[in-house]
Image (spheres, grey):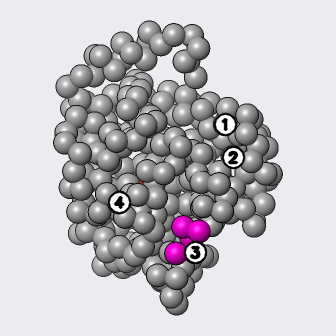
Amino acid sequence: MEIIIQPTLEAATAIAARLVAALLREKPRAVLGLATGSTPLLLYRELVQMKLNWRRATTFNLDEYVSLAPDHPASYHSFMRENLFRHVNLRAKNIHIPDGRARDIPALCERYEKEIHKAGGIDLQLLGIGSDGHIGFNEPSSSLASRTRMKTLTERTLRDNARFFGGAARSPHHVITMGIGTIMEARHCLLLAFGSKKARAIAGAVEGPVTAMNPASVLQLHPRATLFLDEAAAARLKMKRYYRWVFENKPAWQKF
Ligand code: GLP
């Protein structure tokens, strides 16, 4: 794991944006795995401002709420349209987000996996992290080998996301999410975490045991996982000073 700690979320996001931009320039047909939530908002804004060419790129989103129509304001379809898709030249046929209204969810999930495979696999997967360590919507106790499927949200996640629905009671309890096994097949995983609410989950993911109780900890087994943290999210890391030293003393050829 590479742990990059920056003083602010703006500084961390700027480096992450450079990394995504470099991939799109080097590999115009790149396949990107996209995340939602408040964490990647600034990243998407920066990518839009960079005026990159997305025409040949393909995207797969991590997850979507079951039962929400794509035009529901809290759907991840709406989130992506508002924050990225309507601002860049991605082709509609290259955009993939699970359809929360699918009648046959297992069939949709199987198709989603096949489409990722057909596209050549994901080059770079963006990830946020839930306050309980979830990635995508893979809640604690999710199989570390899981594939795209339906999941039930924990009370904690329902509470965390209640603000988007005007209360936890109104939030769908079921979601479709790429599995942890699916995420682990991406060639590069890039996780962003900002703010003190994420500090405990990050400490567990980076320095705790690999456990289904903190799904992000599985990234310890990924050959290329880069974590971008602000000071608050990094606050509970024991080896903070070492991670900083590593980043500041990178050999020139490894710099972003
Ligand atoms: C949801 C999303 C995750 C995201 C998490 C954290 O659960 N499915 O992909 O990482 O929220 O959200 P935020 O970035 O708003 O803290």
As displayed, is residue 252 above or below residue 105?
above
As displayed, is residue 119 above or below residue 15?
below
Residue at 48% x, 30% y: name it: 12
Indicate yes or no: mark 1 CB to ligand 1 under 8 Å. Answer: no
- Left or right for 123, reference 221: right
Q: Is mark 4 on a helix, strand or loop?
A: loop
Report the Cα–Cα distance between label 1 and label 4.
27 Å
Q: Which amino acid does label 4 sit on?
A: Ala
Q: Residue at label 1?
A: 23
Label 2 Cα neighbours within 10 Å, binned few <14 / some 14-19 / many ≥20: many
Report the Cα–Cα distance between label 1 and label 3.
26 Å
Residue 101 image point, x, y percent: 53, 84
Q: Residue at label 3?
A: 111
Rendered image: mark on residue 30 = 2
Q: Is mark 2 on a helix, strand or loop?
A: loop
Indicate yes or no: mark 2 CB to ligand 1 under 8 Å. Answer: no
The reply to whether dot 2 and dot 1 touch (C-beta < 8 Å) is: yes
Residue at 60% x, 32% y: name it: 19
Residue at 55% x, 60% y: name it: 61
Q: What residue type is labelled 3?
A: Arg
Q: What residue type is labelled 1?
A: Leu
Report the Cα–Cα distance between label 2 and label 3.
20 Å
- Left or right for 248, reference 207: right
